Amino acid sequence: MDFDQSAAELGLKEAIKDITSGEKENPESDAFSTAPLNYRNMLLKLMKALSPTGYLETGVRDGRNSTALVAAQEELAAWSPPIFLSVETSSRMVGRLLALFGKGPECSTILDSLLNGQLIGSAAFSETNASFDQNASETRATLQDNGYIITGSKNWVAGASSADLVACLADSGGRPGVFIIRAGDKGFSTGTELTSNAIPGSGFNPVTLRDCLVPSDRAVIPDDKDFLNTVKLWEDQILTSLALGLSQRSYREALSHSKTHHSGGKPIIAYQEIGFKLAEMLTLLQSAQLLAYRAAWADETGNREAEVLARCAKVFCSEACERISTEALQVLGTKGVFEESLAASALRESKFLQIAGTSSERSRVKIGDNVLRDASF
Amino acid sequence: MEFSFSQEQAMFKDQVIRFAVKEIVPRVRDHELKGEFDFQSFRRLGEFGILGLHFPAEFGGSDADVVTTVLAGEALGEAGVDGGLTLSYGAHTFLCADTIFVHGTDAQRKKYLPKLTTGEWIGCMGLTEPNAGSDVASMTTRAERAGEAYILNGNKMFITNGPLADVAVIYAKTGKDLRHAGISAFIVEKGTPGFSAGKNLIKMGVRTSHTSELIFDNCMIPAENLLGVEGEGFLMALQTVEWDRSALMAPFVGGMTYVLKKSIAYAKQRHQFGRPIAEYQAIKHKLADMKIFIEAARTLIYRIAWCKDQGRPLNHLEAAVAKLFVGDWSLKPANDAVTLFGGYGYCHEYDVERTFRDSRLAPIGGGTSEIQKKIISKLI
Ligand SMILES: Cc1cc2nc3c(=O)[nH]c(=O)nc-3n(C[C@H](O)[C@H](O)[C@H](O)COP(=O)(O)OP(=O)(O)OC[C@H]3O[C@@H](n4cnc5c(N)ncnc54)[C@H](O)[C@@H]3O)c2cc1C
């Protein structure tokens, strides 16, 4: 047992700090950077800077989470949630799919480019009428001589319009597979950016695939039947770290306001109504952090409880984020109502966290199933 | 960060669970119903080595580290030992015996610790007063120096093991008009003229631990019963906070694992509408919330224990965070368990109503949730 941050954790976290401290704070709030092309340029620049630190490839080739990764993710997520989400989708989702299930040189070439920060990947998994647990995809992949023909539509694809390639989930003769589509491929198109109240910047788009040909060497069809569950867990782990970053933003903003804003001749933190809220927020934040780190450690070490701990962390951290952010808004008072604040966006995003990946409801059912199956109980 | 236990620690936890399931748990329901202290189980805790786990062997202990000690507490809760017995153990070992061990003279240690670690004697600690709870420094119990003696006058309130204790660590004011700096700690033995205990208070939970007022009416004790030096009592009380936030909290968290196990077993065997209630999403959600609480809470208390093992000074912020979380967040899963059992949950024989009542102490005893928030808000 050791509750101090290890050299690996500190090293990766500091590397992220070094990179982001030279950048503008809250870059996503800048209208310039939210224009798709500007966002893409900013993202590419950051990914190139991140690549030598080892951040992009951490946990990609072995598919494992780690405490060092969470430490760094938390730092990046607190700096910019949309950029964090884009980077993570590119490396920890698409990168891992290629590294662990991809076969052939084309997959390795793409993977290298993703991890060098030269290409941006996004993941097109969700569909309006499909549920990950039951019918994973209504999009079809039909094998022909020269590759797979993909037909269908995807929705809520984060960063689709700024990505170089999209990893698209489709059903191939009853087996789920992921097909790597390049932005310019014929038959592939992204729809108008969806209006979303969460994660500004990266943008969410619908994606249409009309007889889109994907060469076989860009098809990833894992033998592992459980691979979709694995992918969902990766997504949940990313969202858990995002929850930590967002919670930190809300807490810090409220704390700073409570010390500088005066009422009745004293800083508002001096009132129990405010001071106690901040105490509850910090308690939730620290509890969430420790749980997320322990879940990551469990995954890193192959602990038998790794999956259930990851699910516990996802539910707890995303719901803690909502509570922390709503209390932060209360502390900000009228400032939080009349001006856009970090806490307000974190509050909106906390809902995204509870819905995306495995929703809080589905996670709880899975945790319940897990403890009901667990012989040690 | 690294969260594993050593093999010895994990094995010891299993041993404690097996021991408690066999020797203590069968006696819990009966004692709890009657609100009786279980002397036999308390002594068995001593024989098994739990009462003195972290003390050196020369005082009857096992030199265990703090994490192991915390795991033993968690194991007792997990086995199904009631919060009353674990509270009695906590007050005895950490609030009384440990204070004598850390601040006592060699003579005091030799005199009291061997009897306390075996359970031959029962210890208690008196800090709270009828009119001084959270505001400890406003205590009015006084200890006046009179030659080679001190004379104690005043009352202590809500003292765990009060009516049973053979020896008490008592905090009293020696410095006139001083607040924290005027508090000193003393050892008072049962039978000392002028020292008496009130009746066992009838409580909502932790009913097998006996709680009472302690009365000091011109109670004369030898000057050598002073612990450490005058005016350092408050610091001594603060030092027990580390134990309070780790070893005393551990049985609460373990108790929640016990509740989860019972809930799982019940949900599998209870059928409604033609199938086990375990198949309903709403039931799984309750089980999930219990699991989430347990995992979040145990990491917080392990952190306090691990830091103490490293010899670090208490981090008051982290300690308050652990106490606040366990105190406030244990209530919902404890309540959920009662609902999960339906009507049976409201009845004694299924244990969940007991754990529900026991868990209600967590946000009050050893510093209320509000006081934890007060500490945190001062430190941030
Ligand atoms: C079963 C049991 C066992 C116990 N065992 C022991 C023992 O062995 N030894 C011992 O010394 N004590 C013991 N106690 C006492 C316990 O530590 C106190 O009950 C606790 O510290 C609270 O003090 P109080 O009851 O006087 O409440 P009070 O301090 O009177 O508090 C009443 C309410 O006011 C709130 N409050 C108080 N001050 C503030 C503030 N500044 N800001 C905001 N809110 C505030 C509190 O949170 C609480 O909600 C025990 C108590 C119980 C119930």
Image (spheres, coloured by chain):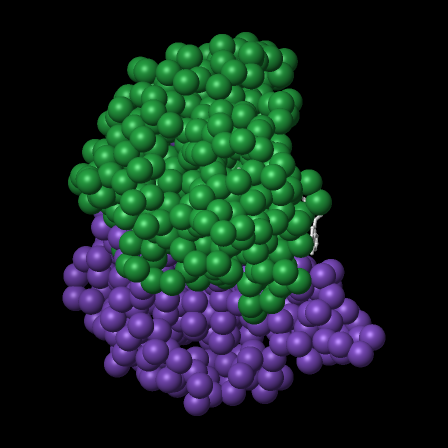
Chain colours: A purple, B green
User: Which image quadrant shows ligand 1?
Assistant: top right
Residue A215, image x and y in percent? 27, 61
Residue sitting at the far bottom: A22
Q: Residue at x 68, y 73 (%)?
A: A258
Residue A51, image x and y in percent? 29, 78
Q: Return the residue nearer the eye: A248 or A358.
A: A248
Q: Residue at x 42, y 23 (%)?
A: B81
Q: Residue at x 38, y 84 (%)?
A: A19
Quadrant in which the C terminus of chain A is drawn = top left
| Above or below: residue A63 compared with residue B47 | below
| Above or below: residue B293 compared with residue A50 | above
| Above or below: residue B292 compared with residue A267 | above
Q: Quadrant of residue A2?
A: bottom left
Q: Is residue B130 visible?
A: yes
Q: Quadrant of residue A145?
A: bottom left
Q: Is residue A235 visible?
A: no
Residue B264, image x and y in percent? 45, 22
